Amino acid sequence: MRPGFVLCRFCYVSASMHEFGLAFVTAFHLIADLDPGLVGIVGLSLRVSLTAVLLSALIGLPLGAAVAAFRFPGRRAVTLFLNTAMGLPPVVVGLIVYLILSRSGPLGVLGLLFTPTAMIVAQTVLIVPIVAALTRQIVEDLLEEYADLLRVMGAGPLTTLVTLLSEARWSLLTIVLAGFGRASAEVGAVMIVGGNIDRVTRVMTTSIALETSKGDLPLALGLGVILMALSLSVNLAAAMVRETRRA
Amino acid sequence: MLRRSFVLGCAAAAALLLGSVQPSTAADRFITVASTTSTEDSGLFKSILPKFTEKTGIEVRVVAKGTGQAIDIAKRGDADVLFVHHKPSEDKFVAEGFSTERKPVMYNDFVIVGPKADPAKVGGSKDVSAALKAIAATKAPFVSRGDDSGTHKSEQALWKTAGVDPTTGDGWYRAIGQGMGATLNTAAAVNGYAMTDRATWLSFKNRGDLDVLVEGDKRLFNQYGVMLVNPAKFAHVKAADGQAFVDWLVSGEGQKAIADYTINGNSLFFPNASEPGA
């Protein structure tokens, strides 16, 4: 346990006190003291998960809309695949990315294993299907409304995609937030491809797993409280954007 | 359309911003060490690595797993140095050409922890074989790593010495397939026995009603060895910097740093690089 995580002497709490109370006290002190270790870990968590979400939106939104709007052979198979891939177990994605990025794997020369980049790749693989599958569903429903209009406009494929995505933007924001929730909460994939290296690839979820294994349950739960607070702030920010844009 | 670009743009800007303000901790010069949870979780690395980095300017990145997994990482060429504790596996690693030389570094010891009520009456014993037999006879819960780690392999060897096959028991022997900490958490929850390295135990916080019951048997000693991954096998291995770390660990300075690390006055690891055959 790093020294910065020690509770201050004014807040001594007896061991018999309920662990949940202790977790909140721990969380409060970590934030109030602006623990440098914690700041680094939170920063890396946000950097990895937000980058993965951004990449997934860039890939998943057009992909999902295209599957919804266009007729092509194998379309139902693609839909089925995307829906199934929404439930990809993080630990399996982690293992596959690990084997590909390992020095003995096909992309080993890049030397990306045990770096934040590897973690971004794994989380992107994990959430692209979520963004794409949900986007497909929403755009498909929307298409029933807009099909005639688009035909009258004589819209080409690109205009069709852009129009549909633009009209569905607020629902899509919720999808992207769901993707962020999945990315920031998962531990299986980043643990395997990142290696949980102190100050290099250690993020919130892997820290929680580590502190649990060290038997420091209040600290682990305290970190969990902070992680949930982070998720809350991201969602609040999104809700505010939505409100101000709508008004 | 404009609005969407705006939102996306904001997200992109935020992501880029976060990327740039991230403190750049990645030194140009670093080595990756595959090691075990006991060395990391006990706080040993936090204590000794800064001394090495200060002297040489080489940052050490530790991936801490069970011994079995750490060896696998090194065999795939994903680490420069392997630092683990299971001599037969280490000798095999060298014999297969993944390293040219193994050097002994230090030892710590295993202890058997269990409930203070001690249904098997093994408390204070120095004979680990007799203790294991007694635990098996009373069918008191025993939680095992079951994860092919160095500790798990040592535990299996001790059962064999005791002449007991615990896996044929009716549910009192629980192999959970997880790390040392998770094993101790489980043992505390079911109030059962477990074998742990002393270092992890001393730094472990969620002890519940558990206490150290069996210790001091020579068979419970646990030797650590260090190896540079063979650069002839993997061209990208940072041979010079990795070798510098190996040499430092077994040098007088490194050995002293290991001996100096204590928790509440208890030494956790005992340097023995100069002991023949260790």
Image (cartoon, coloured by chain):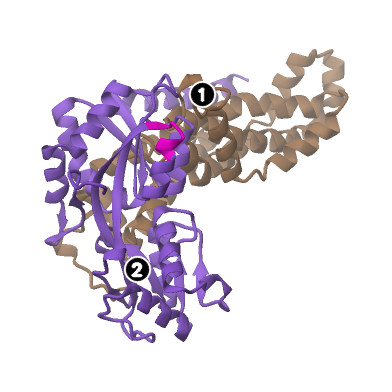
Q: Which residues are magenta?
A: B93-99
Task: Tell me which chain appears brown.
Answer: A
Identify which residue is drawn at 23% across, 73% down: A14
Q: Nearer the viewer, residue A218 or A237?
A: A218
Decide: is B26 above or below B263.
above
Locate residue A93, reporting x and y percent: 59, 39
Q: Report if residue A22 lies within the magenta region.
A: no
Label 2 chain ID: A
Task: Tell me which chain appears purple.
Answer: B
Picture quadrant of residue A99: top right
Picture quadrant of residue A74: top right
Considering only order in the chain, which callout, 2 or 1, is on the residue closer to the N terminus? Answer: 2
Identify which residue is drawn at 42% across, 22% down: B16
Locate residue A130, reporting x and y percent: 65, 38
Decide: is A143 above or below A134.
above
Residue that label 2 marks: A19
